[in-house]
Image (cartoon, helix red, strand yellow):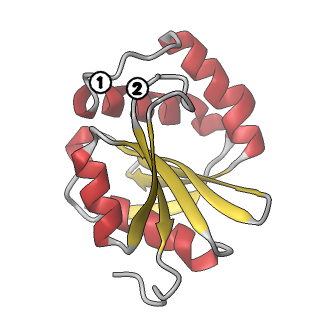
Amino acid sequence: MKVELRAARAADAAAIADVLLTSRRIFLPYLASPRSDDEIRDWMRDTVLRTETLTVAVAGDAVVGFLAVRERDGITWLTHLYLRPSHVGRGIGSRLLAHAIAVARRPVRLYTFQQNEGARRFYERHGFVPIAFGDGSGNEEGRPDVLYELASDREQFG
């Protein structure tokens, strides 16, 4: 299966929201969303696509994954990385992450939930190290999280 990476377009908003919603339902069943599916669709279209840089992974005509990045106060934040469950384990997440890292200004940081062991292993395998653990008071889901940063000596992605 050929998967291409490209910049997200406004027309991708619904497909991106579907990837996020489906992935969270399958991989994060313990995580109750504080927003309805329709609110998430609106937020993706009206906020995320307008304020962050999104790269989508496309197979055929279908968006099968995406990664969102924003810069704030000299830090590059990876804010979202989601794949359709049927496309996990095929290297697509690694490609999206490598693409973002290649052009990112250091430091690069991200949050994930402490309970999301799969994501934690993924990020650690790609050179991110935990730098802080939170009790959930800093996220809208109220779940304990981990702040990761790409190790400064990590020149090669791998």
Q: Amino acid at mark 2?
A: Leu
Q: Relative to 140, does residue 8 appear above or below in the rendering?
A: below
Name the residue: 35% across, 72% down.
Answer: 126
Assess disc 1: are there few (<14), some (14-19) or many (≥20) residues with their C-alpha within 10 Å of its C-alpha: some
Q: Residue furthest right?
A: 73
- Across and down, in percent, residue 144 comes to 39, 34
Name the residue: 46% across, 23% down.
Answer: 142
Name the residue: 41% across, 82% down.
Answer: 157
Residue under label 2? 21
Name the residue: 30% across, 51% down.
Answer: 119
Q: Nearer the viewer, residue 2 or 37?
A: 37
- Across and down, in percent, residue 146 comes to 42, 48
- Across and down, in percent, residue 96 comes to 45, 63
Residue under label 1? 25
In the displayed structure image, the side of residue 65 where residue 75 appears, left or right: right
- Residue 61 visible, this angle: no
Mark 2 secondary-structure assignment: helix
Where, quadrant-wise, is the C terminus in this rendering? bottom left
- Residue 39 visible, this angle: yes
Quadrant assignment, res 4: bottom left
Q: Amino acid at mark 1?
A: Arg
Q: Relative to 138, does residue 4 appear above or below in the rendering?
A: below
Callout 1–callout 2 Cβ contact below 8 Å: yes
- Across and down, in percent, residue 18 comes to 43, 28
In the displayed structure image, the side of residue 8 where residue 131 appears, left or right: left
Assess disc 2: are there few (<14), some (14-19) or many (≥20) residues with their C-alpha within 10 Å of its C-alpha: some
Q: How many marks?
A: 2
Where, quadrant-wise, is the N terminus in this rendering? bottom left
